Image (cartoon, rainbow, N blue to C red):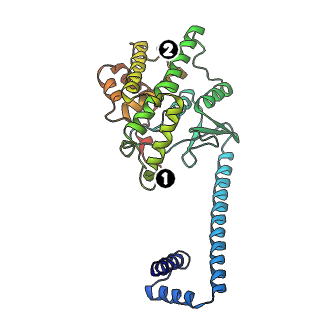
Amino acid sequence: MASQRKRAWQSKHCLLRHFCPCKSAGMLEQAIESLTAISKNERGLIVASTGVAASLYFLASQIYAVREKSQLRKKWNSAPKDVVILHQLPRGKFTPSISPFPLKLETYLRMAGIRYENDFTEPKSLENKTPWITLNGEDVADSQICLELLADKFQKDFSCHLSPEEKATARAFQIMAEDHFYWTGVLWRWVYTKGKTLRQIHATFAPPLSLKIPLVCRRMKSQAIGQGLGRHAEKDVIEMGIKDLRAMSHYLGNKSYFMGEEPTELDCAMFGMLAQLVWNMPGSPFERLLNSELPNLKRFCERMKDRFWSDWDQCLLPVPL
């Protein structure tokens, strides 16, 4: 009985602290005594009123969030005609993005000379994809869909000189990188190292965001299992990734870019992926491989960086959210 009274007192204490914060302990005790002295019906009314207050607070927060999104939407829609709003994750410490897909798409925008503005406030689309774009009031998600739409609209096709066989080869390498090798990196970053390297590579990765790492790790593990690669042992996954990288290196050879001496859309995708190994996977077996056996892949990343990212260092600075 005594423990029940103690829990009841603690509940009232916490309730008052939350909804009626007092400046002193004495004022708080007076409020508790007043609550104890009133009738049962009156106490029920207060509890009901507290529930209403909580509901109103939740409703107000939702209205505020909708208002904020509405203001962002007005800002995006007011962009000049044909200026792309690129929605993506905040900048990293060593690369402009710690995800291969935003880096791929932003590199393409630079390669194509398409005007764009970055937005770091809403990195995820309604489809939960990053990056996504807003162009002339229309939203488009998925880096590859965005790239193809922009190539068609602005007539920027950097692969038009390739033969059908070469285009098929380019597509095969891109799918290997983005739909197979990508998952070896996901497993290494989120499952095998449990997200511990994120604090080293992300400029704004601090509490409360860092508290979500275990949840993200579990989600990414589940996705990798669904994709299939996550069902294998770690050593087998790493070996698969190494074989992919060796294939990329052998095909690149001594060429400046994957399809020849001038870059194509494939190079944007390969740069987005390989840059993660060069700068964002400290201590990984993939980083060690590029530093030893496969230096041409690292040189390729440096070449893309020098050609399309003259402001690379300025893009590493933390951006206020």
Q: Earlier in the sequence, mark 1 or mark 2?
A: 2
For this orientation, the residue located farthest to the front is 1
For the point 44% across and 85% down, the residue is 25
Q: Is residue 317 above or below residue 192?
A: below
Give the Cα distance between marks 1 and 2. 38 Å
Toward the left, the furthest residue is 292
Would you place residue 245 above or below residue 310 in this image?
Answer: above
Q: Position of residue 60 (x, y in %)?
A: 65, 66
Q: Which residue is mark 1?
A: 320
Q: Residue at x 31, y 19 (%)?
A: 293
> Which label number is shown at residue 259?
2
* Pick the front one: 55 or 72: 55
Identify the element where label 1 is drawn: loop
Q: Position of residue 133 (x, y in %)?
A: 62, 38
Name the disc covering residue 230, or none. Answer: none
Callout 2 amino acid:
Met
Whole-percent x and y of residue 3?
A: 45, 78
Judged from the image, the secondary structure of the residue bearing numbered disc 2 is loop
**Which residue occupies the foreground of this view, 247 or 75?**
247
Q: Give percent across and percent down for residue 319.
A: 47, 49
Question: Would you say residue 268 is visible in this rendering?
Answer: no
Residue 176 visible in rendering: yes
Q: Quadrant of residue 52?
A: bottom right
The residue type indicated by label 1 comes to Pro
